Image (tube, grey):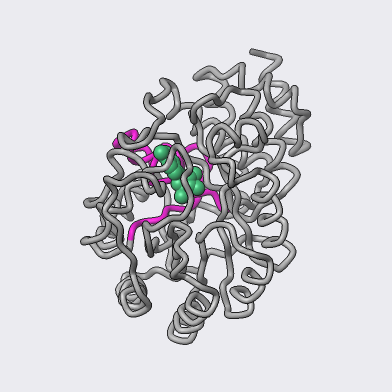
Amino acid sequence: MTDAIRLLETLERERSLSLEEYRALLDAWSPTLAAAAAEKAVAVRQRVYGNTVFVRGLIEVSNICKNDCLYCGIRKSNTACERYRLEKDDILVCCEEGYALGFRTFVMQGGEDGYFTDDRLCDIVRSIKERYPDCAVTLSMGERSRESYERLYEAGADRYLLRHETADAEHYARLHPSTLTLAERMRCLRDLKEIGFQTGCGFMVGSPYQTTEELAKDLKFVEEFQPAMCGIGPFIPHKDTPFKGYEAGTLEMTCFLLSLVRLIVPTVLLPSTTALGTIHPTGRELGILAGANVVMPNLSPLSVRKKYMLYDGKIATGDESAQSLQHLKERMASIGYRIVVDRGDVKR
Ligand code: 5AD
């Protein structure tokens, strides 16, 4: 325990540990160690961002996907999934509603749907930025060519989220079809960062075959990559995928990792994810109390929300909806945090 606390103190001071040290820290998880990590992470977050929580309006633009990731509910080979796509006008309606509610960042997220060519996506980005020049646009549309990312940046997109999923190539290969590789994922992430996007990576916690060895690599990668954002959420099985079974302790481990990532990259924009809210009734509060500073309520039309099922039980009504922002504000206020009307850019 004292050894682990010492590692935590080194991390707090140096923002860096060796791979072996990250692993030792993860293996030493205990409620006491996690509480110590959370206390340090909250202090760091407080210093950089105060008690503000940024909100993002999430627009799930399509559940059509050419990929077949083994863990994902909208994978191509899931024939039970009813497919949909939002077109430009639908998306603009979401933004209009979101803007009125106080959102100043719109996140367009979707499967890798060939409909969203560069021309179409750039046109949508330009229209959003024209109508809402005070808003940031985040894209989360998967792997694309460097040229495509360049065009999207030119069109005005500010941020891009592409979780690396796991920083271990072999583990990556066990979670994905052979058409997808960690090397290509990394190529995308490096291109995005070079082009100038506020770039987000991230990974699932409790995914099949994952041990603290893989998680240690994720932390080392975060340390090296220095992302502007990092999406960390629990793996939750989806009934129509080959991966069954939910790992006990995933909630606790996710919160611990949020704290460690906050210590590694103090300025990181760190969402308390929907998946965290799915596995525990106050999961999103727990994430904030572990060091997260972003929540991403759903702005997608109610009619499609139930179809964007990445995992079982994904919240599709209630507090998840952007429309109940008021309730979310109250919940955050009850733990001492303030949701703000702000683009919420990364602090440099
Ligand atoms: N459980 C949790 N997260 C998942 N994702 C995909 N499938 C699942 C699942 N079953 C995450 C991936 C992806 C993001 C959009 O959703 O990390 O990057």
Q: Residue at x 63, y 68 (%)?
A: 149
- Choose between 283 and 172: the one closer to the eye: 172
What is the residue that sits farthest to the bottom in this orientation?
A: 130
Quarter of image, res 168: top right
Figure label count: 0
Q: Examine the rendering and report whether any part of residue 45 can be seen.
A: no
Using residue 235 as the reference point, say whether residue 93 is left or right of it: left
- Choose between 229 and 260: the one closer to the eye: 229
In the image, residue 198 sits, relative to residue 267, either above or below, namely: below
Residue 280 place in picture, x, y as percent: 33, 34
In the image, residue 298 sits, relative to residue 274, either above or below, namely: below
- Choose between 211 and 101: the one closer to the eye: 211
Point out the image quarter for the N terminus: top right
Point out the image quarter for the C terminus: bottom right
Residue 90 place in picture, x, y as percent: 31, 75
Q: Examine the rendering and report whether any part of residue 194 can be seen.
A: yes
Does 74 appear in magenta? Answer: no
What is the residue that sits farthest to the top in this orientation?
A: 1
Q: Residue at x 52, y 26 (%)?
A: 35
Query: Magenta segment range?
Result: 269-298
Q: Give ligand 1's quarter of the image.
A: top left
Using residue 141 as the reference point, say whether residue 145 is left or right of it: right
Q: Residue at x 44, y 62 (%)?
A: 113
In the image, residue 87 sits, relative to residue 25, either above or below, namely: below
Using residue 121 as the reference point, say whether residue 25 is left or right of it: right
Residue 132 place in picture, x, y as percent: 45, 81
Does 296 appear in magenta? Answer: yes
Quarter of image, res 144: bottom right
